[in-house]
Image (tube, rainbow, N blue to C red):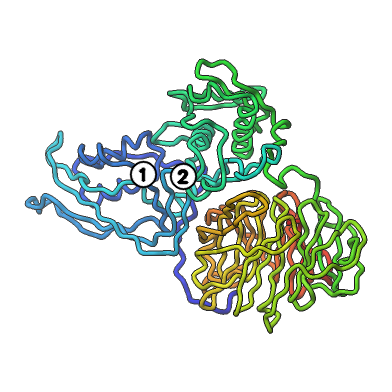
């Protein structure tokens, strides 16, 4: 039972059930202004085609101008309206205004991009007029803000998160890898376009990446490529082949480009259909096949880390040496020392980060003042430190290191006199300082690189609180003289007042450990765009110091705890102890 924190009122309404459907109802004859406003708000939560019934609550002019797809505003709860009763006896009243209010927590823009917000007050005005109708005077809304206003439960019922995929820029064609770009699309049918879920996802993919990710990814679809006109439904046939008819912009695409385009479609739809799409056929504007790509062939372009064998886990034992738990889907192998100086050398280590190919590792000295890079597959001597910190206290020295999918090594020096974010290209050479323009005085406490190498998760401390932010990694110039910066930091877990540990868990998801304001420690999943999946909260575990997850979601979640040692969580199971002694467990990366 929680023993601290404020007493809060609990909303009796249940969270939205994705199987529940709301049907819009037109305003009744003689409806009061209160009924018109309530009916309009309720109708916005329906799947009403083109919002035809919803528009009946508006005057003709307001209906023609209202753009429901402009922006979706997500409130903590359904919007409240001010109470402005107008009695039937008061026939002199011809207009009335209502204020819609609530706590705004997120928006979804026209690109389907989710933007979390620190809870802020929401206030908008609806203006009603009494106009002449078929059966006399009737109240209708004549001033209405564009977009939809939904409570969180209705939003989760109506929308679902989908990863669409684009290619990371700055890599050779042989190294091309896909990057997840999460968006929210309508469950079932989109009222505005009439498209089913699969068609919405393909349409969003063809329209290009969201603004936040656009500077670091590219699409292989030629500019202007779209679905052939009037396509509203895409359904795999009985052989699980999906045919995608495109417009003329794609007619001249070469076979290599077309196959890469088809891989974008395959990975975008991988978790979207009940039966997995096994093959995609892209069609020219005349209906002839442009190219065909099977799911096995698409693995050539798989997002980094999504299609390899089972990854091993690595940790630091009680003697300060690095040990490895051989790869398995259960995380229950027998630990063994790694080869090289980290496994049997004299140096005592405190943290480790292993390259994704599991050939090299980077490890911190016992007191965090030196970072070493060495092989974990071949014997050798401990090399000179690759990075050192001059800070007086161990908590102000180097963070645990992390490797990106390009083979680069990252670490932050928390020295108050000289804070730095550093990158070692290929894990070797002189450390390069990476600029982070939008830190605003915050200090980097921990970092984790995504497998695609275009995003970095940072734990930032400011004014006594530690929050999780995601930054975009931008690279400029040739490989040997590349200038790298981390820009456009955005909140990834705004609902948590303090985050103590985090790890990437797949292409666009992280697992975090933290507390809400006045709450107790919890472990949950968050999306890279800051949204929380409906199944986000995980079973509780006590005093978590660090968390580790793999890109393969079938591998167990691992946690380093203060009392129970290293524990694991398999899908659908409870936490189980793996090792009583040991710390700083990580997956490659």
Q: Is residue 189 toward the left or the right of residue 270 in the image? A: left
Q: Which residue is mark 1?
A: 70
Q: Position of residue 213 (x, y in %)?
A: 53, 48
Q: Residue at x 69, y 68 (%)?
A: 541
How much space separates mark 2 and mark 1, taking CA atoms? 10 Å
Q: Nearer the viewer, residue 462 or 386?
A: 386
Q: Which residue is mark 2?
A: 112
Q: Residue furthest left?
A: 92
Q: Residue furthest bottom?
A: 392
Q: Is residue 231 toward the left or the right of residue 176 in the image? A: left
- Of mark 2 and mark 1, the one earlier in the sequence is 1
Element assignment for label 2: loop
Q: Does residue 39 sit above or below 122 in this rendering? A: above
Element assignment for label 1: loop
The label shown at residue 195 is: none
Q: Does residue 397 sit above or below 66 in this rendering? A: below
Q: Quadrant of residue 130?
A: top left
Q: Nearer the viewer, residue 344 or 287?
A: 344
Q: Is residue 436 toward the left or the right of residue 574 in the image? A: left
Q: Nearer the viewer, residue 165 or 473?
A: 473
Q: Position of residue 588 (x, y in %)?
A: 76, 56
Q: Position of residue 254 (x, y in %)?
A: 61, 24
Q: Nearer the viewer, residue 68 or 205?
A: 205
Disc 1 crowd rating (10 Å Cα; few below 14, some 14-19, many 20+) is some
């Amino acid at each position: 039972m929680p023993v601290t924190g404020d007493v809060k009122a609990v909303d009796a309404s249940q969270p939205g059930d994705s199987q529940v459907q709301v049907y819009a109802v037109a305003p009744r004859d003689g409806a009061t202004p209160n009924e018109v406003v309530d009916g309009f708000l309720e109708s916005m939560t329906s799947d009403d085609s083109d919002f035809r019934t919803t528009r009946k609550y508006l005057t003709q002019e307001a209906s023609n101008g209202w753009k429901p797809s402009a922006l979706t505003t997500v409130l903590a709860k359904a919007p409240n309206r001010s109470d402005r009763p107008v009695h039937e006896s008061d026939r002199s009243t011809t207009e009335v205004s209502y204020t819609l209010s609530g706590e705004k927590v997120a928006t979804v823009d026209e690109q389907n991009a989710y933007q979390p917000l620190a809870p802020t007050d929401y206030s908008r005005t609806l203006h009603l007029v009494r106009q002449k109708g078929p059966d006399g005077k009737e109240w209708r809304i004549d001033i209405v803000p564009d977009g939809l206003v939904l409570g969180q439960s209705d939003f989760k019922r109506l929308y679902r998160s989908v990863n669409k995929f684009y290619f990371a820029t700055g890599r050779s064609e042989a190294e091309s890898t896909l990057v997840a770009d999460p968006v929210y699309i309508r469950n079932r049918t989109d009222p505005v376009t009439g498209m089913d879920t699969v068609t919405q996802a393909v349409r969003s993919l063809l329209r290009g990446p969201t603004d936040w990710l656009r500077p670091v990814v590219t699409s292989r679809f030629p500019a202007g490529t779209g679905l052939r006109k009037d396509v509203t439904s895409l359904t795999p046939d009985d052989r699980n082949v999906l045919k995608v008819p495109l417009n003329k912009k794609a007619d001249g695409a070469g076979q290599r480009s077309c196959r890469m385009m088809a891989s974008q479609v395959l990975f975008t739809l991988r978790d979207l259909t009940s039966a997995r799409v096994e093959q995609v056929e892209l069609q020219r504007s005349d209906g002839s096949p442009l190219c065909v790509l099977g799911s096995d062939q698409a693995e050539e372009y798989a997002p980094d880390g999504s299609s390899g064998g089972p990854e091993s886990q690595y940790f630091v034992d009680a003697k300060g040496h690095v040990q490895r738990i051989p790869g398995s889907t259960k995380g229950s192998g027998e630990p063994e020392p790694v080869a090289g100086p980290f496994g049997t050398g004299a140096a005592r280590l405190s943290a480790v980060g292993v390259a994704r190919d599991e050939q090299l590792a980077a490890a911190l000295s016992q007191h965090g003042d030196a970072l070493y890079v060495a092989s974990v597959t071949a014997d050798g001597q401990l090399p000179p430190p690759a990075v050192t910190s001059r800070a007086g206290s161990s908590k102000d020295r180097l963070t645990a290191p992390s490797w990106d999918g390009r083979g680069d090594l990252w670490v932050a020096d928390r020295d108050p006199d000289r804070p730095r974010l550093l990158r070692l290209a290929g894990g070797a050479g002189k450390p390069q300082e990476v600029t982070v323009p939008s830190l605003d005085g915050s200090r980097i406490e921990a970092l984790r690189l995504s497998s695609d190498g275009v995003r970095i998760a940072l734990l930032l401390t400011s004014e006594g609180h530690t929050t999780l932010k995601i930054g975009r990694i931008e690279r400029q110039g040739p490989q040997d003289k590349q200038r790298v910066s981390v820009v456009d930091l955005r909140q990834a877990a705004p609902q948590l007042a303090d985050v103590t540990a985090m790890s990437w868990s797949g292409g666009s998801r992280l697992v975090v450990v933290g507390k809400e304001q006045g709450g107790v420690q919890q472990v949950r999943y968050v999306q890279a765009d800051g949204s929380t999946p409906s199944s986000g909260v995980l079973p509780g575990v006590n005093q978590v110091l660090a968390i580790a997850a793999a890109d393969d979601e079938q591998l167990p979640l691992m946690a380093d705890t203060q009392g129970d040692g290293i524990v694991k969580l398999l899908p659908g199971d409870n936490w189980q102890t793996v090792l009583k002694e040991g710390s700083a467990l990580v997956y490659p990366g």
